Image (cartoon, rainbow, N blue to C red):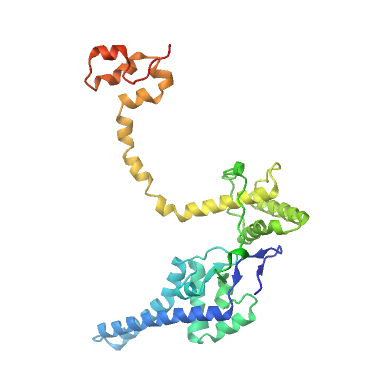
Amino acid sequence: MSELVTGEAVALELRPARLPSRALAVLLDLIVTFTVYIAVSLGLAAATASLDDAAQLALAIAAFLLVLVGAPIAVETLSHGRSLGKLACGLRVVRDDGGPIRFRHALVRGALGVVEILMTFGVVACVASLFSARGRRLGDVFAGTLVVRERVPAGQTGFVPPPPPWLAGRFAGLDLSAVPDGLWLAVRQYLTRMQQLDPQVSWAMSVQLAGDVATRTGTPAPPDIPPAAYLAAVVQERQAREARRAFADRAAPSPTPLGAYAPPVSGAAPAPTSFATPTSTSFAAPTHVQQPQAVPVAPPAASAERPATGFVPPA
């Protein structure tokens, strides 16, 4: 099975799914979807028996659109391209650059899937997949997506090497919004394959890709950083931003409990302020050291011999 190859002649590690596996995944999805549709239709028929024919027809059309069209779109959007059939067959829908799909991708695929799969019994989808080099149907072509195999042997997969530790957070201020997905794909795949390339070819590709990324960001690449390390650091920064966006809703409630406890901490005057700067104030002014001693009950003679903090002032 041939691998995907980018414009920069860098091989993509995810392999496109072929017609048999995709057909099996679609068949499993259709079985589940039609089972739910029949159950919903029977329930609506029993609940709307007293209505007129026009109302029953309208409800039947709504059930068809919601179950057979809306449900697959919602499942692909929420699962990031893995429906029940694709999950069983080890497949996944991704963007052309290898990233996860969004609602607009699932919407285009689902809308064209009604014509390709439901109305023509899959004939149009099969013909389009056979004539496509990557096995894509018309919905994939217009949505800019691709169905790939997730279950690839571990020895055939590559990983993006991390940048040097001294570059962590170096490019946090870069504007990465203007970098297209195709360029990110080329950079990521170059980093996974750079050890397999000729050193001169690898260096030339890293210089070219680093220049393209720097041009898109509007900030020139630092001359003291190797191009490959610069690319790895920028890719890591983009992944960190995507992770923060993905978990923003989960991490948002965390500042609320901390803010709720902020007033009591600031209101507790004597004890925190005396220990906030032990080296500059607690030893210089004995009155601050004796001030917390008023809380516990102790003989006055003990406080005169030893400070309340337990630290002996330096000679």
- What residue occupies the far bottom of the structure in this picture? 53
Please state, as top left, top right, bottom left or bottom right, where the C terminus lies in the image.
top left
Q: Quadrant of residue 308?
A: top left
Horizontal and vertical percent position of residue 41: 33, 83
Horizontal side of residue 23 vs 310, given as left or right? right
Horizontal and vertical percent position of residue 132: 63, 78
Relative height, residue 165 to residue 21 (above, below):
above
- What residue occupies the far right of the structure in this picture? 200
Horizontal side of residue 287 vs 233, given as left or right? left
Residue name at image x 37 percent, y 14 percent? 285
Horizontal and vertical percent position of residue 295: 24, 22
Residue sitting nearer the eye, 116 or 300: 300
Residue name at image x 63 percent, y 51 percent? 232
Q: Quadrant of residue 280?
A: top left
Q: Quadrant of residue 312?
A: top left
Relative height, residue 146 to residue 20 (above, below):
above
Relative height, residue 282 to residue 7 (above, below):
above
Relative height, residue 251 to residue 91 (above, below):
above
Residue sitting nearer the eye, 116 or 261: 261
Horizontal and vertical percent position of residue 278: 40, 22
Please state, as top left, top right, bottom left or bottom right, where the N terminus lies in the image.
bottom right
Q: How many marks?
A: 0
